[in-house]
């Protein structure tokens, strides 16, 4: 899937989403599971475990959601 966009913020977001998804797919193919190796506790509360591919997917989606606002800021220069 190739996506052409004049907006560089969207291009970075799509790249992060696709890269993260491919990372999880490759893990699933190679190891038959996706290893979540980042595991945190906030106080005594356990935060759900995740991996870097998950970070890229979520960051890409977040960036895609704010891309219109960022693009407007970049165009106006403010």
Image: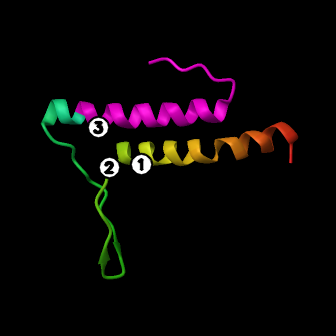
Label 2 packing within 10 angstroms: few (<14), some (14-19), many (20+): some
**Mark 2 or 3 closer to N-term?**
3
Residue 5 among magenta residues: yes
Instruction: Left or right? Give the position of 31 relative to 66.
Output: left
Q: Position of residue 78 (x, y in %)?
A: 86, 48
Specify start and end residues of the magenta stretch as a single range. Answer: 1-26
The residues tagged by marks 2 and 3 sit, at their Cα atoms, a distance apart of: 9 Å
Q: Quadrant of residue 64?
A: top right
SS of the residue at dot 3?
helix
In what element is the residue under mark 1?
helix
- Residue at 66%, 30% in the rendered image: 8
Q: Which residue is mark 1?
A: 55
Is 77 rendered above or below residue 29? below
Cα–Cα span, label 1 and label 3 = 11 Å
**Mark 2–mark 3 contact, CB under 8 Å?**
yes
How was this image coloured?
A: rainbow
The reply to whether the C-beta atoms of the residues labelled 1 and 3 are less than 8 Å apart is no
Q: Are marks 2 and 1 in contact (CB under 8 Å)?
A: yes
Of 60 and 40, nearer the camera is 60
Q: Is residue 5 above or below residue 74?
A: above
Where does residue 27 sit, x and y in percent of width and height? 22, 35
Q: Main secondary structure of the magenta part?
A: helix
Residue 66 as seen in the image, left or right of residue 69:
left
In the image, residue 28 above or below residue 6: below
Q: Which residue is mark 2?
A: 51
* Residue 2 in the image, given as x and y percentages of width and height: 49, 17
Within 10 Å of disc 1 (Cα), the crowding (few <14, some 14-19, many 20+) is: few
Task: Identify the residue position indicated by label 3 in the image.
Answer: 24
Q: Is residue 34 left or right of residue 63?
A: left
Label 2 sits on a secondary structure element that is loop
The residue at the far bottom in this view is: 44
Q: Position of residue 77 (x, y in %)?
A: 86, 42
């Amino acid at each position: 899937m190739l996506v052409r966009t004049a907006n560089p913020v969207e291009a970075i977001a799509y790249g992060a989403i696709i890269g993260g998804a491919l990372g999880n797919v490759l893990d699933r193919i190679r190891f038959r599971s996706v290893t979540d190796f980042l595991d945190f506790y906030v106080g005594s509360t356990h935060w759900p475990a995740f991996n870097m591919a998950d970070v890229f997917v979520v960051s890409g989606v977040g960036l895609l959601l704010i891309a219109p606002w960022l693009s407007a800021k970049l165009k106006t220069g403010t």
